[in-house]
Structures are given as structure tokens and as C-alpha cells.
Image (spheres, rainbow, N blue to C red):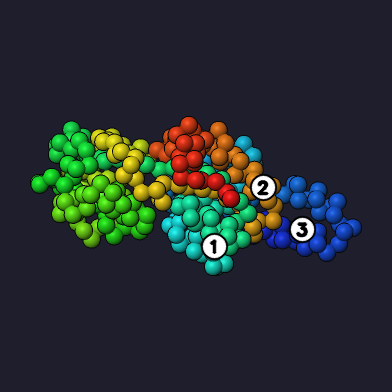
Amino acid sequence: MEKSISRRSVLTGLVACGTGALASTALASETKADTPKNLRVWSCGGLAEAMRPAHLQFTKETGIDVAYTGAFAGALGKSLLMGKGETDVFAGRVLALAKNLRKAQKMSYFKPLCFTSYVIVTPKGNPGEIHELKDLGRAGVRVAMAPLASPPGSQSVMGILKKSGLTEAVMKNVLDKRASCIQRTITEVTEGRAHAMIVERRLTVDPRYANHLEIIEIPEEFFPEGPLTFTVGVMNSLQDKALGAQYVDWITGPTGQKFFAQTGFIPANSPKGQELCQKLGVHDD
């Protein structure tokens, strides 16, 4: 803790010297170059499994320490929009959030980061004989769902059911309509109490669940567009924009994008990611 406070104090002092005395510029620049660099990164909590190992690699390659926070993107975004929180880089979910941060002049720019997708999971052996979405509405099928989960988790699943015209039939089969945690609810499937659940593909590569699940694809036409997109952008409050740009270029570049592919996302730089960028209009105006 003392080391962290000391670094912040040094950086603050250097900024003050740089703005207060031109004669000290050369000395301040030399000292700053020798000071370890730090970067604050906030993201949607769903990205944490990719972000944590990515940041270790980024620090290894650049020497830049990353102070990372992964939480509910809506709450983090609201905090940034209202000026109640501050970070250097923000990787949020839902394209509209990034655009709102740009309109509010809180974010300097953003780039597409990755995309998510949805699948049906069943226990190993598929005891409920689930083969497509409509099977979730079949009499006797036990469906796991977390209807009260924070958006967009619950909203995405309901969006899929609505687009497929299966809301009423499937909701009749949901085991617990008061469930609020997707991670806890998926254990209903891994432990065999439920026949099926609609989840983000990223959960199917999570070591806690991967070996206990079978996957059934859902046609893309049923995916709600809003929650599919993740972006990453540099905040206007960051003084060293070059530092933020270095991170964003790395995390959206070949090395950084590998971590998202490994954790079940669609990297923005992949052929499929580029297709989705065009389809969903993911670009900074």
C-alpha cells in the first residue's frame, strides 16, 4: 500500500512541476521516464476471465502495471457518465454505452473489442433429448434460468425466447423463476437437475463447467443485438493518451485478441468479428 501511494504522489508532483516551472521540464521528463507506469482499466465483469491473463501478458511485455476492475458494466458506465467514478480505459458491454460516453465527452474514442454468442447447454448425455430451441418448451423438460439476473444476462435470454416465439412455453418449464445468479443456476445443468439452459458460449469453456456440458447451437437470427458487443475506449480524464492508446492497440491486436478467443468470445479482429462489426455498426463515429 505504501508503495502504491508513493507512486501516485510522485506522479502528482511531476505533473505539478511540469505545469508550474518550465525550467524543470527536462528534469521532470527524465524522472517520469524512470517511474513505473500504471493504467486503470474497468470492464464488464463478464470479460474478467479474458482480461486477467491478458493483463499479465501486457505487463510482461510492456512493464506497465494494470489496476483492473471487472463489474456490472451498466453500473460502471453510469458512474462514469455521472462523473462519480474515474478510470483510464473502459471496456463496456452494449454499443450504446460507448456511444453515450463519447457523446458526453467522457470517452476520447473506442474500438470494437469482442462479441458474445449464445448456446443451449445440457448435461453430458443430453438426457432430455434437447436438439433445438423449441425443445425447451416441450412438456416435461426442466429448464434452468436466472430470470432475475442483472441485465443483460436475463434480458438476453428473454430476447432469444421472444424472437423465437417460445417465451410462454419455455417459462412454464423454468425450475426457479426467482433465480438471480447465472453462475449458480448453471450448476442445475452440470449436476443433472435441469435438462437445459441458454447461456453465453463463454461459460461453456469455463473450467468449472466445461467437462459437464454438451452444446447445442442457436441460430444467430434469434440473438438480441444489443448485448452482443463489447468495446474498449480511452477516457478523456487520462492525461497520457499515448499510454491508453498503447493498451487499446495491444488488447485489440493479435496478442490481446487471443485471450478472448480462448475464453469463448468472438475476437473483433477475427473474420467473424469483422462481419459482426459491419452487421452491427460497431465503429466510432
Of callouts 1 and 3, which one flags the residue occurring earlier in the amino acid sequence? Answer: 3
Mark 3 neighbour density, 10 Å: few (under 14) some (14–19) many (20 or more) = some
Mark 1 neighbour density, 10 Å: few (under 14) some (14–19) many (20 or more) = some
Label of residue 80 in the image: 1
Is residue 158 or residue 151 the one in the foreground? 158
Mark 2 neighbour density, 10 Å: few (under 14) some (14–19) many (20 or more) = some
The local secondary structure at tag 1 comes to helix
Residue 212 left/right relative to 173: right
Residues at marks 1 and 2, CA–CA distance in whole angstroms: 20 Å
Q: Amino acid at mark 3?
A: Leu
The local secondary structure at tag 3 comes to helix
Label of residue 246 in the image: none
Residues at marks 2 and 3, CA–CA distance in whole angstroms: 17 Å
Q: Identify the residue under disc 2.
A: 243
Question: Residue 194, percent across and down?
Answer: 18, 46
- Farthest residue toward the right? 23
Q: Residue at x 36, y 49 (%)?
A: 224
Q: Amino acid at mark 2?
A: Leu
Of circles 1 and 2, the one toward us is 1
Q: Residue at x 47, y 47 (%)?
A: 230
